Image: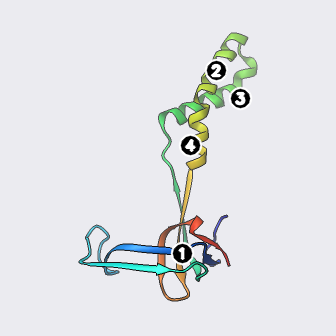
Amino acid sequence: MTLNVGQRVRLAADLRLAGSVIPAGEPAQETGVFAASLALAAGVEGTVERVDEHHRQQSREVREYLRLKSLLDDFGHQMPPASRKQLEEQVGALEEQWVAYQRQMLRVTVRVRLDNGFVLDDAPEETFASA
């Protein structure tokens, strides 16, 4: 599911947040002096304030797959049969890395202001369902 800014959502599962607390104005690198734990029940509703897409970095194998696949698609029909077969084998050998990259290519996180006043930032999109 793709979430959009302004969309109403609800928590899809119970959440337990635990860790150090940092006052809102301080940089995130500094560790807070407070420890906290907070539980939020599934079904709590809120509004999406921000959607961030995080693209995964391409490995050398993925870049090579894209290069060879493009070459095969664009010029494969003009190649001698032996060269085409060799290129198809090279593309096939890299197919597994390409499929794995596609599964993890895009990670979406959101900032949601819950109706109870809490704000969840950098939460995975899967944490929420449409309200």
Q: Which residue is mark 3?
A: 73
Q: Residues within 10 Å of mark 3 (few under 14, many from 20)?
A: few
Residue at the spot x=56%, y=87% of the render? 115
Q: Earlier in the sequence, mark 4 or mark 2?
A: 2
Relative side of 27 to 3, left or right? left
Q: Quadrant of residue 41?
A: bottom right
Q: Which residue is mark 4?
A: 101
**Contact? badges 3 and 1 (CB < 8 Å):** no
Note whether 128 is above or below 81 in the view shown. Answer: below
Relative side of 118 to 7, left or right? left
Residue at the spot x=47%, y=73% of the render? 121
Residue at the spot x=57%, y=41% of the render? 100
The amino acid type found where label 1 is placed reads Asp
Q: Earlier in the sequence, mark 2 or mark 1?
A: 1
Of marks 2 and 1, the one in the foreground: 1
Q: For marks 4 and 2, give the CA distance.
A: 19 Å
Q: Earlier in the sequence, mark 4 or mark 3?
A: 3
Q: Which residue is mark 1?
A: 14
Determine the secondary structure under disc 2: helix
Frontmost residue, 89 versus 75: 89
